Image (cartoon, rainbow, N blue to C red):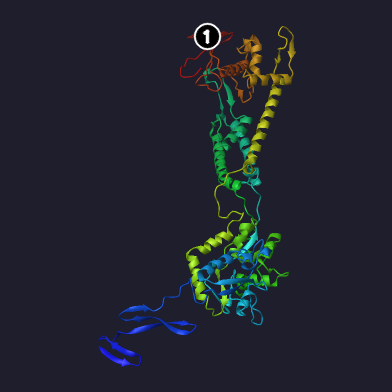
């Protein structure tokens, strides 16, 4: 170990050649020069003679009155509604005013707010001088500049900034272009009018092809009365013209139909139509909810690149602001083209205030470039404004002060404390939220009103009215073309004279029967003529003779080679109606199912049970306990 006395005092070195048993003084630079505030010893460690300055009470700001320069800008600094009745700082409100109060409570200083004389933030002039709040700080006319003052490298050269109290970026504001609002017939919007037209044409084409194919193929013609084997060759085709148009409707509405294709060709047509309807219905259902609930925007531009690539929409910034300086100094090609457009455009696209820029956006084809925080604030209060694309850059707002200001460190610490305690975020929510417009990212489900789906009720009512109108026409047609509409007048029960009832009387009588839950008009007519209308009438000699073959029915035809008379076919249809009414002496055959289940026996054929004889045809009841009667 080596010890010696040097110019600075005692010096010791250990056996390893390292200095030992020494002390270092800790100095602080202040207005009075360097002063010792602590000592560090190699053996004893750190020993502070004075605690670090507290941010609550400081020697430099305690009870000091600062001049605050600012500019009127919503929501940072605003005049109160009754500012004429107030004086001093009480005339102002806003985010920056509340932040000043928070800083004053922490640092224990007083302040006086005054508006900047020229009403601009500050830009450099041709002779090197600055305007606005920056110019007042340089000229020492104000101690602080508290506003939405953007921290830029050019401003940092002439003034000092505190740590940023808010982070933001440049954004594009444009007015909202809304498409057609959801209306009564919004359920038609998922498909364009052209698609609806082609769907109608497809329906008509499929119906016609189905009718043609079903008539051509022999496998769609079948005997509906297998009980009359060997005696009746009545062939029908279930695909009449009406059924051919009704079958695709049932498939399209996903409700099915009692008609089932029998032939391979008709099944092919049906399968293709079902596959078509599956895709159409799935696509319609997937898009229906969006078209009923969402009010779609039609925006001609979607990004800043789209804005730079066109000239129909004018765009500009605030004159003398940091946004204008950003485009002026930018070396990015897109931003350079935008600056050249704005700088050369006449009349000028630059505005003097944010309010002027927003008014220009709403009243003309104009896009305004401004800070994102201002964009968000005004969009919350005007639903006709929207933001286009994302942010063009990232920057922050800071408190401006004179170059070399002794207050900088203390304001930095105070702002950090406000951020850590989320007090700045609370102030931002206080002044930004509360607008009447919902947030764009709010996609919560909302109930549908009549303005969204009212059209389907209109369609329902129209369909019911058309059905009633058609029923009336059918009723009148039946009365005009059905014999036996004469009946005894109910007002004169003892009179034998028959009165021809008018159409209105018949309809009124039918409606009365509906209200009283009575039988239909047709059954009352049949009862008026006795039971003979319900039973098969005996065939006369000339009626027993075979009629010409090939007689057309409503949905089928008679084939040659049977000798079956036409009245028999009418009997079959008539007896089928009796079965439908639930007569106890006749039941449905399990083989026929479609019309009736009666078997025909030639005269003289032995029967196992008593039967009802009616001239040349005899009918018996098929025994099968499995079928309902």
Q: How many marks?
A: 1
Per the image, the residue denoted by label 1 is: 611
- Above-or-below relation of 131 to 227: below
x and y, in percent, of residue 371 in the image: 60, 66
In the image, residue 591 above or below residue 118:
above
Based on the displayed image, in which of its 4 quarters is residue 337 positioned? bottom right
> Is 469 in front, or is 239?
469
| Quarter the N terminus occupies | bottom left
Residue 500 quadrant = top right
Looking at the picture, how far across and down is residue 136, in whole percent?
63, 77
- In percent of width and height, residue 472 lies at 69, 26
Q: Residue at x 71, y 8 (%)?
A: 493
Q: Which residue is drawn at 49% across and 77% down?
A: 59
Q: Where is residue 93 in the image (x, y as percent from the top left)?
A: 61, 64
Query: For this view, does 588 lie left or right of residue 191?
Result: left
Residue 305 showing in the rendered view: no
Residue under the point 64% across and 14% down: 526
Q: Which of 218 and 308 is in front in this view?
A: 308
Q: In this view, does 619 lie above or below 453?
A: above
Along the line of sight, the residue nearer the viewer: 373 or 55: 55
Residue 498 relative to residue 264: left or right? right
Frontmost residue, 469 versus 118? 118
């Amino acid at each position: 170990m080596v010890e010696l006395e040097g110019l600075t005092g005692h010096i010791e070195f250990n056996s390893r050649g390292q200095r030992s048993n020494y002390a270092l003084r800790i100095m602080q630079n202040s207005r009075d020069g360097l002063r010792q505030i602590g000592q560090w010893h190699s053996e004893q460690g750190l020993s502070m003679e004075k605690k670090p300055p507290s941010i609550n009470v400081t020697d430099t700001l305690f009870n000091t009155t600062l001049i605050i320069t600012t500019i009127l800008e919503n929501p940072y600094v605003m005049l109160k509604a009754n500012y004429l009745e107030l004086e001093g700082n009480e005339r102002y409100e806003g985010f920056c005013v509340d932040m000043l109060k928070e800083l004053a409570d922490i640092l224990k200083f007083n302040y006086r707010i005054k508006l900047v004389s020229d009403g601009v933030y500050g830009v450099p002039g041709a002779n090197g001088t600055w305007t606005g709040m920056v110019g007042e700080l340089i000229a020492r006319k104000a101690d602080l500049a508290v506003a939405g003052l953007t921290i830029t490298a050019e401003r940092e050269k002439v003034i000092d900034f505190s740590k940023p109290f808010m982070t933001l970026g440049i954004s594009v504001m444009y007015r909202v272009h809304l498409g057609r609002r959801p209306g009564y017939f919004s359920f038609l919007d998922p498909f364009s009018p052209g698609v609806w037209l082609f769907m109608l044409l497809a329906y008509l084409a499929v119906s016609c092809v189905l009718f043609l194919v079903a008539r051509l193929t022999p496998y769609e013609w079948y005997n509906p009365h297998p009980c009359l084997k060997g005696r009746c060759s009545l062939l029908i085709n279930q695909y009449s013209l009406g059924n051919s148009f009704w079958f695709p409707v049932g498939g399209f509405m996903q409700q099915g139909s009692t008609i089932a294709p029998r032939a391979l060709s008709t099944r092919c047509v049906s399968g293709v139509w079902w596959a078509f309807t599956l895709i159409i219905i799935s696509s319609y259902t997937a898009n229906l909810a969006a078209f009923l609930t969402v009010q779609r925007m039609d925006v001609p531009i979607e990004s800043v690149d789209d804005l730079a690539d066109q000239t129909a929409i004018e765009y500009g910034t605030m004159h003398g602001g940091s946004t204008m300086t950003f485009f002026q100094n930018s070396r990015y090609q897109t931003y350079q083209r935008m600056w050249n457009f704005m700088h050369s455009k006449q009349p000028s696209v630059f505005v003097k205030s944010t309010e002027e820029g927003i008014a220009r956006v709403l009243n003309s084809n104009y896009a305004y470039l401004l800070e994102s925080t201002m964009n968000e604030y005004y969009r919350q209060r005007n639903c006709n404004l929207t933001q286009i694309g994302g942010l063009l850059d990232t920057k922050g707002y800071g408190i401006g002060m004179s170059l070399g200001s002794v207050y900088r460190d203390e304001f930095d610490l105070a702002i950090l404390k406000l951020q850590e305690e989320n007090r700045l975020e609370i102030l931002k929510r206080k002044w930004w939220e509360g607008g009447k417009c919902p947030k764009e990212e709010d996609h919560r489900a909302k109930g549908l009103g009549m303005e969204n789906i009212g059209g389907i009720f209109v369609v329902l009512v129209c369909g019911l009215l058309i059905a009633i109108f058609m029923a009336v026409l059918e009723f009148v047609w039946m009365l005009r073309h059905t014999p036996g509409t004469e009946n005894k007048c109910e007002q004169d029960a003892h009179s034998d004279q028959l009165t021809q009832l008018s159409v209105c009387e018949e309809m009124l009588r039918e409606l009365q029967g509906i209200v009283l839950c009575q039988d239909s008009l047709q059954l009352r007519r049949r009862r008026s003529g006795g039971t003979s209308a319900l039973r098969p009438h005996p065939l006369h000699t000339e009626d027993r003779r075979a009629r010409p073959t090939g007689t057309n029915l409503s949905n089928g035809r008679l084939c040659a080679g049977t000798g079956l008379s036409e009245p028999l076919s009418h009997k079959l249809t008539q007896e089928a109606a009796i079965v439908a009414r639930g007569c106890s002496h006749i039941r449905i055959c399990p083989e026929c199912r479609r019309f009736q289940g009666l078997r025909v026996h030639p005269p003289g054929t032995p029967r196992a049970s008593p039967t009802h004889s009616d001239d040349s045809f005899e009918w018996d009841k098929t025994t099968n306990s499995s079928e309902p009667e």
